[in-house]
Amino acid sequence: MRASAPTLAEEAWRLAFGSLPMEDGLAMREEAGWRHFPGNDPGRYAHLLSVADLDAFLASDAAARPRISMADSSREGGAAVPEEDYAFEDGGADLPSLYGCFDRGATLVVSQFNQLHPPLARFCRGLEQVFLHAVQANIYLTPPGAQGFRMHYDTHDVLVLQVEGEKEWRVWPGQPFPNPTRRTPWPGGIEPLEDAVTMTLRPGDALYVPRGVLHDAATQDGGHSLHITVGFMEPSFAQVLRMAVDLLEETEPALRATFPSWRLADGPAGLAALVQPVAAKLAEPAALERVALALMDQLAADQPPLLARGLFLHDPTPETRLRLAPGALHALVPMPEGEGASLRWAGAPVTLNAIEAGWVERLAEGATPAELGLESLGLCRKLRRLGLLAED
């Protein structure tokens, strides 16, 4: 019997959270507490990133604003280094100036490096398959004895992966400004709720910090620090509700009805009565299913597809063992009354009859066209050319 290889999601989970059970990790994401994951392997994240990878990136045309930025907490005012100090007017990296800023203590920040670096792309894709929302990877390279940003919070959950060197972190438990988003910018004047907890991250360590939790980090005089900040770009309830209203307005008369503003004088009870029918429509299973499908479609469309093919490929034979491409985000959505399914992915949906949908379900575990039935060969070749099937 063939041994079952770990899926892309399982590989990414173990790399991110070690032996933490997935149920516990999902519960952690629903709370507001930070967590330190000490590592036992200094080379744990070495295959994801290195300083040599950053040097190669800086030598390319991709090194430009806004993907690159720099930060130095020793500056007066904001920590962000002015663009003109390290980039040309067209946004391209001015390497002599950038190196000078780095030598003087500025942290180099590379945003969404997962869009350019295949090892990080695969890692983020695995986590996306677990959490069903976008995941990004920002890079921070800090010179010795320096600090990029002062105390702050992020507007999404993050997981810090320490790749090289050491960095001392301070985390202030709690959320003095609960659940901030990009639409709720830093209000100023925020004070920590508790004393800081201090820890040193070493290669192989990870640190989970929920949004709204204050933190900062600095290197010591002895060496640099290279870490990956994995950003969990989870939607808020407000985003989902806005999406639901936009999706349902066309088909739901209750959402298009006139809002009788003259009833505002009736007080809270009258207003609640007006809103109740609309709230009930948004909570109907059909409405929730439509929103869920829209969120999945958006995830597949917005993220690089990581298709399982290149410019040239050979069509599969009846004996070629195939498996659904591990890096291609997809969803098999049943059609009404068992009429088949729609295979949703980054490209145009693929309509499947009931038999074809059954083949696709088996291909999730791996199979040959001969095992499925020779009549499946046409669909397998089609999905292989789309990049949705990989040779197993």
Image (cartoon, helix red, strand yellow):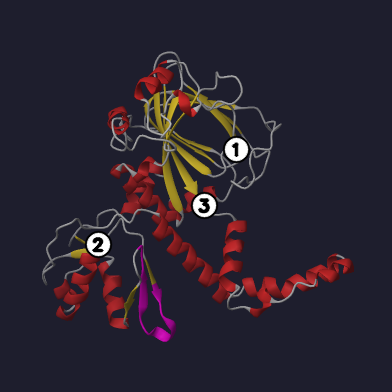
Asked where in the image residue 342 lies, by quadrant, the reply is bottom left
Question: Does residue 142 appear left or right of residue 191 in this picture?
Answer: left
Quarter holding the N terminus is bottom left
Q: Residues within 10 Å of mark 1 (few under 14, many from 20)?
A: many
Q: In which quadrant will I find the C terminus?
A: bottom left
Placement of 98 over or under 136, stated as above or below: above
- Which residue, given by chain and number where applicable, does mark 2 sit on? 387
Secondary structure beneath dot 1 equals loop
- In primary-sequence order, the first of circles 1 and 2 is 1
Tag 3 residue: 234
Observer-nearest of 175 and 151: 151
Residue visible at 28% across and 30% down in the picture: 59
Q: Element at badge 3?
A: loop
Spot occupied by residue 85 in the image (x, y as percentages of width and height): 46, 23
Question: Residue 294 vs residue 368: left or right?
Answer: right
Q: Nearer the viewer, mark 3 or mark 2?
A: 2
- Which residue does the numbered mark 1 point to in the structure image? 213
Q: Amino acid at mark 1?
A: Val
The residue segment tinted magenta is 333-346
> Who comes first in sequence, dot 1 or dot 3?
1
